[in-house]
Image (tube, grey):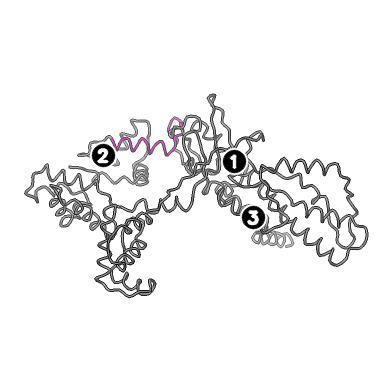
């Protein structure tokens, strides 16, 4: 009976286990990409006067001060009776980890040149700059700017005229009418790229077709989209030629030109804004020499080295060495200094843990994907999942997942997200392990080289892939095809 109670108690303790504040801090720092971490460190240094962030330029000065300190004769003091403090934790400010770039052997190297990815002008800004050149009434331009701000990531306007009218009066702060909104929308639809401001795919294609009214096939293309849009999008192109008096060659050419129109004119909208507002700085650099040796470094960008502020250490030294009873103010000062130093040491320790965790994870990825980092060939990527990295790095799977989220690595062949290196695998009958990325590449190659008048079905692709050495099931073919955005065979058929 007692044994049963004991088991229940243990289960209850396990269920109520939570992360300590220090563990939560480590988790947050691990998840941060380098730019976000830089801001966090700056904030921490500003908020905690006991935390000193110093630049590499001041390192020599720090070392000189350190030498002077070693010549000084500090009295370690005795432990206080009522305010006992272990001074050993607060007197060794020199034992602070270096957060600058280190190679695997701990040696310093020059920080590589940053390669940020950003656009100087976002898509919205581009459209608004075009509106600056439009000679229209100021009221119309104001409404047009509001419409531009209402476009979705595809460049479509999903709101109807009445909704825009209501929002302008409620949020815009000025009264207008439907005619003015329609006129402003017409202005937006004249901007580049063609198709912006459409309410549907059909309207988007019509706007692009009508932009070139001098085109010999304009009327034919307009009729196809206006009257036979459903047949076009479902690629029932074989039904279209008999419906027109134009030659089959003209109809085929019109269909081909329509298929080249941009169905999402604002496709760059979300991407350019994301790149503008969230500049990507690689968190790691992996360099390969001619002999195939790899060097992994952690990029800390402009994050300063951290140490305990000297004045706070001096407070601990001065007050802690007193053998007489401290005054009330001195006790308050000592307590304040200890509190701030505790917080500073906790942050420094968390930064150390972050660095070690990130380096362990990246080293494991490099070890598992060595051939890719040497050659840069995507087909040489091995099947790799979080568990593989976690086992090799000696970390928890959840920790590896946090490290790989929003992190990038600069290689000799470009900049990649860490998520890029993960893929599931497939084992052939001969025991050969293939990555799903390699299989998808082979599948795409088969589809690209197929006869477009008789595209291969998934069942036919099974046989073709088997001949190439990829014996995979039909449902796997369908899964990979859908992931790559490739439609089924009947929708790939061309006239």
Q: Which mark is residue 483?
A: none
| Direction from residue 149 to residue 199 in the image, left or right | left
Please tell me whether mark 2 sits on a helix, a strand or a loop.
loop
The outermost residue toward the top is: 291
Q: CA distance from mark 3 to mark 1?
A: 20 Å
Disc 2 designates what residue?
456
Which residue is rendered at x = 34% and y = 37% of the image? 443
Q: Which mark is residue 25?
A: 3
Q: What are the residue bounds of the magenta stretch?
A: 427-448
Q: Nearer the viewer, residue 78 or 437?
A: 78
Please tell me whether mark 1 sits on a helix, a strand or a loop.
strand
Give the image location of residue 312, x and y in percent.
Answer: 78, 55
Q: How many marks?
A: 3
Give the image location of residue 160, x and y in percent.
Answer: 29, 68
Question: Looking at the image, is mark 2 or mark 1 earlier in the sequence?
Answer: 1
| Direction from residue 452 to residue 354 in the image, left or right | right
Which residue is rendered at x = 49% and y = 47% of the image? 280
Mark 3 vs mark 1: give the one in front: 1
The outermost residue toward the left is: 245
Mark 2 vs mark 3: give the one in front: 3
Please tell me whether mark 3 sits on a helix, a strand or a loop.
helix
Other-residue count near label 1 (Cα within 10 Å), few / some / many at <14 / 14–19 / ≥20: many
Q: Are marks 2 and 3 in contact (CB under 8 Å)?
A: no
Taking the magenta stretch, the answer to whether it contains residue 428 is: yes
Give the image location of residue 473, x and y in percent.
Answer: 36, 40
């Amino acid at each position: 009976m007692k044994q049963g109670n004991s088991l229940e108690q243990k289960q209850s303790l396990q269920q109520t286990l939570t992360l300590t504040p220090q563990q939560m801090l480590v988790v947050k720092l691990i998840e941060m990409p380098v730019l976000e971490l830089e801001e966090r460190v700056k904030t921490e240094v500003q908020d905690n006067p006991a935390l000193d962030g110093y630049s590499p330029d001041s390192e020599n000065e720090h070392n000189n001060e350190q030498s002077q300190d070693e010549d000084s004769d500090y009295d370690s003091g005795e432990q206080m009776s009522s305010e006992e403090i272990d001074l050993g934790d607060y007197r060794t400010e020199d034992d602070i980890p270096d957060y600058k770039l280190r190679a695997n052997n701990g040696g310093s190297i020059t920080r590589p040149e940053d390669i940020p990815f950003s656009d100087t002008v976002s898509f919205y800004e581009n459209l608004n700059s075009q509106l600056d050149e439009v000679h229209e009434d100021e009221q119309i331009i104001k409404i047009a700017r509001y419409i531009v701000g209402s476009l979705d990531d595809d460049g479509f306007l999903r709101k109807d005229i009445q909704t825009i009218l209501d929002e302008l009066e409620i949020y815009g702060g000025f009264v207008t009418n439907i005619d003015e909104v329609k006129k402003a929308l017409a202005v937006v639809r004249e901007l580049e790229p063609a198709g912006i401001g459409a309410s549907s795919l059909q309207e988007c294609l019509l706007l692009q077709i009508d932009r070139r009214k001098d085109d010999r096939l304009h009327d034919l293309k307009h009729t196809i989209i206006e009257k036979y849009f459903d047949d076009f999008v479902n690629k029932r192109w074989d039904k279209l030629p008999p419906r027109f008096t134009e030659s089959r060659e003209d109809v085929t050419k019109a269909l081909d030109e329509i298929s080249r129109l941009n169905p999402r004119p604002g496709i760059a909208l979300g991407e350019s804004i994301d790149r503008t507002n969230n500049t990507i700085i690689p968190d790691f650099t992996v360099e390969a020499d001619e002999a195939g040796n790899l060097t992994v470094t952690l990029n800390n960008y402009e994050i300063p080295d951290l140490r305990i502020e000297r004045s706070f250490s001096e407070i601990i030294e001065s007050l802690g060495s007193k053998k007489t009873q401290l005054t009330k103010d001195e006790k308050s000062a000592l307590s304040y200094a200890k509190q701030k130093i505790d917080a500073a040491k906790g942050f420094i320790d968390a930064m150390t843990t972050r660095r070690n965790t990130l380096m362990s994870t990246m080293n494991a990825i490099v070890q598992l994907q060595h051939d890719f980092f040497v050659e840069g060939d995507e087909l040489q990527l091995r099947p790799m999942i979080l568990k593989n990295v976690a086992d090799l790095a000696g970390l928890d799977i959840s920790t590896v997942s946090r490290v790989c989220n929003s992190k990038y690595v600069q290689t000799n062949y470009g900049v990649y997200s860490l998520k890029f290196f993960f893929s599931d695998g497939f084992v052939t009958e001969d025991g050969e392990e293939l990555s799903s990325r390699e299989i998808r590449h082979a599948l795409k190659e088969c589809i690209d080289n197929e006869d477009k008048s008789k595209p291969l079905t998934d069942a036919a692709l099974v046989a073709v892939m088997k001949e190439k050495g990829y014996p995979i099931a039909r449902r796997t073919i369908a899964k990979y095809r859908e992931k790559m955005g490739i439609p089924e065979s009947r929708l790939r058929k061309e006239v």
